[in-house]
Image: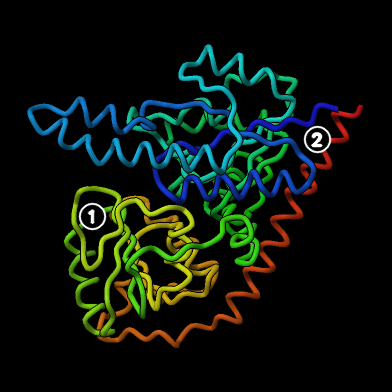
Amino acid sequence: MNNRVGILSRHAVPNYGSILQAFALQDALNSMGVDAEYVDYRIPRDFPLADAMRASGALGPIRAIPKAIGARKFEAMRKGLLRQSRRVTDADGLGGLLAEYPVLCVGGDQVWNVMSDGNIEGAYLLEGAPDGAYKFSFSSSFGKNGLDARERDRAAKAFARFDRLSVREESGQKTLEEMGLEAQTVVDPVHLLSKETWFNRVEPCTPRGVSGKYCLIYNLHPSEAFNRYSAAACESLGLEVVSIRPSLRKTMGKNLFYPSLHEFLWLFDNAACVLTDSFHGTAFSLLFNTPFVDILPEQYAERNKAILSRYGLESRISTELQPEELRLDDFDWAGVNALLAANRRSSTEFLAETVGEFSDRLIR
């Protein structure tokens, strides 16, 4: 029986969350006896180095330096962690590649959000997939509440071709149900694995020069509001500052420029406190029981709000918590862990039921 599953996701976006959520879903499927790999389809947004090189004026090459370093590092991380198909970059190549898989999965952060051209990327709607393939989504996200009206008919037609649908946010489930489609809300793939499993798969490693108690800053959307809050919070807590630095932009405290995945996980696990605007920064803080404050980004903050709401932690949004009021001992981690375990079980059950369904179909 050919049980190959091709996964389409934003696996090539150059950030830690994209790689780690991709690995977690692949790992979960492989543990169920499935031969899962990522369809290595790259869209223009996946090539930030090219965008930087095209920048006008003399600053173009300068801006490209950190992008080039990051591109090389993240590509090495992907090759070390993910199984990937041959690479395709256009619709014709993608259509030929999708035809090779009897089962196709769409999963991950913002796959159904609009791209820079104002449209949802057709690959993540499986518009080029053959009719005979089994199609499902796992933890797919719209990246926001609802769907733009002009994309609704197109998306509804595409979703109707899926055999099973699951999404990461309850708002996404509501959107699909309004289209007359059945869907289930599941966890982000990084929560499919326990902390112990993560450290078995990606052994944590201490970054050079980091020791003692520290506040970890993981900021993907630079803003003065984030900087002001972080400075006040770290001063109030009396902690040293360590920042994960994904660009030439220098941030607070000790800057770690593109740490490895092993170091990334160690930093979240060992921090006294995390200040972040990242969905996956929040997700790993929850998983590792690390106290945190979520400083919401200006765009697509619904993702962060949704995961905080799921665990009853809306009070950890910075607008609800003044820096001088921060405490590190006021989390009900037992309650959070119980919810994490329950959500992991129900999400794993959905995945196992899906595997059972398409396996039966392939046998027939």
Marking on residue 358: 2
Tell me what residue is drawn at x 44 percent, y 39 percent.
Answer: 113
Q: Nearer the viewer, mark 2 or mark 1?
A: 1
- Asked whether 52 or 112 is in front, the reply is 52
**Labels 2 and 1: the sequence-earlier one:** 1
Q: Mark 1: which secondary structure?
A: loop
Residue 274: x %, y % from top left: 37, 71
Residue 96: x %, y % from top left: 61, 14
**223 relative to 273 in the view: left or right:** left
- Quadrant of the snapshot with the N terminus: top right
Residue 118 in which image quadrant: top left
Residue 68: x %, y % from top left: 29, 35
Marking on residue 222: 1
The vertical placement of 241 against 329, above or below, is above
Tell me what residue is drawn at x 38 percent, y 76 percent.
Answer: 273
Tell me what residue is drawn at x 52 percent, y 37 percent.
Answer: 79
**What amino acid is labelled 1 in the image?**
Pro
**What amino acid is labelled 2 in the image?**
Phe
**203 relative to 62 in the view: left or right:** right
Q: Mark 2: which secondary structure?
A: helix
The vertical placement of 88 against 26, above or below, is above
Judged from this view, the residue extending furthest toward the top is 92
Query: Callout 1: 10 Å neighbours few (<14), some, many (20+)?
Result: few
Whole-angstrom CA distance, mark 2 to mark 1, is 44 Å
Residue 58: x %, y % from top left: 7, 29
Tell me what residue is drawn at x 62 percent, y 68 percent.
Answer: 340
